[in-house]
């Protein structure tokens, strides 16, 4: 039944007839042109900012400013558009504006539709060239040699802990800095082109299999697990196999034409991976920042306690601490720590000065805006 002349959300009567529909679409067309004009005015201002940046040697990608832009618009959003939609629109808008300023290339650990790729899309949007490389050290090399402007690497996962290749690469290329972090809620799905009962093999990246091991043991007890280099590769592999499934993202299912047999099969319901955007610079202060450092200590009793007491004395909250073996010297360890604050904050400066006296040596890997969790 067609109901006519009810009230719309703004109080004006809504004509629910075909003529009413046409009138509403005409309103949308009018707004679209206004939006387009406003978007291009904004882009022209961003292009002017780009000119100033190239004159003063400023970086095109400014994670701190982008956080500020997002928090301005999300804070002002009264709906009905959801936060995730507004965020997506502004992410693409800033991506386009960055492109006008000359942001060119981002390297990530491929292939496409891996979680690293999804994190890169989340931060950089569509208007940038993505360079797929085969390993985490290769992402660092690309950044270090200035073949790309930015790199995207995983830092840690809430279930599996640190990504050793990333930490090791910071030791090898200390000029590479973290300029932004991305916290991605990682949801794994079982993808296949066969029924659950036919599955004999499950392919995925080691970490993804590990993050789903209880689910797989319970639901596919007779299937064997097989590690491949990425979740997206697993999805590609099982396309034509009538007895295989992959653990991968929903986006990989779409890309490789697979059915999602089961959703959200990760054992930990809050499974999250933290990624770092790496570059040859870090980010300006926002007031809600983190700083990452790596250091070694002397082999003496209490050496690590002396380091930690510097953070305590300066009332600095640690957000992550990892130790990992320094591959070049047996028995030596490197500590990787991040904490609240920016390296331009007075108390962080003071703490870093004191840390120099108790570390052997210490280097700042970067200050960057603290990220909020992004869901898919
Ligand atoms: O404010 C700037 O520095 C800009 O270049 C503008 C802008 C934007 O589009 O809002 C674009 C790129 C930067 O990463 C941050 C913000």
Image (cartoon, grey):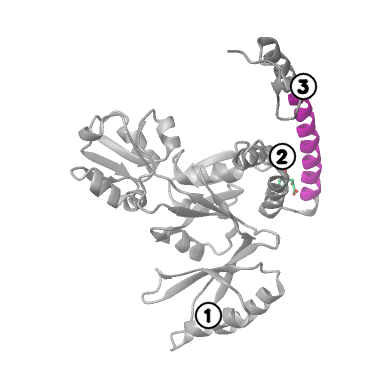
Q: Which residue is mark 3?
A: 30
Sequence-wise, which precedes: disc 3 or disc 1?
3
**Residue name at image x 20 percent, y 45 percent:** 221
Q: Measuring from the top left, give residue 136's x and y in whole percent.
A: 45, 53
The magenta region covers 31-54
Q: Measuring from the top left, give residue 82's x and y in whole percent.
A: 62, 39
Disc 2 versus disc 1: nearer the observer:
1
Q: Which residue is mark 1?
A: 308
Left or right: residue 237 versus residue 128 is left
Q: Regarding mark 1 in the picture, which secondary structure is present there?
A: helix
**Residue name at image x 78 percent, y 40 percent:** 47
Predominant secondary structure in magenta?
helix
Residue 142 visible, this orientation: no
Badge 2: residue crowd in 10 Å (few <14, some 14–19, many ≥20): many
Ligand 1 within 8 Å of the CB at mark 2: yes
Q: Which residue is mark 2?
A: 97
Quadrant of the snapshot with the N terminus = top right
Q: Measuring from the top left, give residue 268's x and y in whole percent.
A: 38, 54
Residue 240 visible, this orientation: yes
Q: CA distance from mark 2 to mark 3?
A: 24 Å
Disc 2 versus disc 3: nearer the observer:
3
């Amino acid at each position: 039944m067609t109901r006519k002349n009810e009230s719309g959300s703004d109080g004006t009567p809504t004509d629910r007839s075909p003529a009413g529909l046409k009138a509403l679409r005409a309103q949308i067309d009018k707004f679209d042109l206004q939006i387009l004009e406003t978007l291009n005015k904004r882009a022209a201002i961003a292009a002017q900012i780009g000119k100033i940046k190239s004159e003063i040697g400023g970086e095109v990608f400014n994670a701190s400013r982008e956080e500020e832009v997002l928090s301005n618009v999300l804070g002002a959003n009264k709906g009905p558009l959801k936060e995730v939609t507004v965020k997506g629109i502004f992410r693409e808008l800033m991506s386009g504006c960055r492109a006008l300023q000359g942001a060119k290339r981002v390297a990530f650990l491929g292939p496409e539709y891996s979680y690293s790729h999804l994190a890169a899309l989340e931060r950089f949007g569509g208007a940038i060239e993505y360079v797929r490389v085969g390993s985490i050290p290769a992402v660092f090399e690309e950044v270090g040699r200035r073949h790309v402007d930015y790199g995207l690497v995983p830092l840690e996962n809430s279930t599996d802990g640190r990504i050793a290749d990333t930490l090791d690469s910071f030791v090898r290329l200390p000029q590479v800095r973290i300029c932004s972090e991305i916290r991605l809620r990682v949801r794994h799905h079982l993808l296949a082109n066969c029924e659950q009962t036919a599955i004999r093999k499950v392919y995925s990246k080691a970490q993804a299999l590990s993050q789903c091991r209880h689910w797989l043991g319970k639901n596919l007890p007779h299937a064997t697990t097989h590690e491949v280099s990425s979740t997206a590769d697993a999805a590609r592999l099982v396309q034509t196999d009538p007895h295989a499934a992959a653990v991968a993202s929903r986006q990989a299912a779409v890309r490789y034409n697979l059915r999602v047999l089961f959703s959200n099969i990760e054992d930990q319901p809050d499974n999250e991976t933290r990624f770092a955007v790496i570059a040859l610079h870090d980010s300006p202060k926002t007031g809600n920042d983190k700083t990452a450092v790596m250091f070694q200590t002397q082999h003496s009793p209490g050496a690590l306690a002396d380091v930690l007491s510097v953070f305590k004395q300066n009332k600095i909250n640690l957000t992550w601490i990892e130790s990992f073996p320094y591959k070049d010297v047996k028995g030596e360890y490197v500590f990787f720590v991040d904490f609240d604050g920016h390296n331009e904050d007075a108390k962080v400066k003071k703490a870093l000065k004191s840390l120099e006296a108790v570390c052997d040596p210490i280097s700042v890997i970067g200050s960057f805006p603290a990220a909020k969790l992004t869901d898919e």
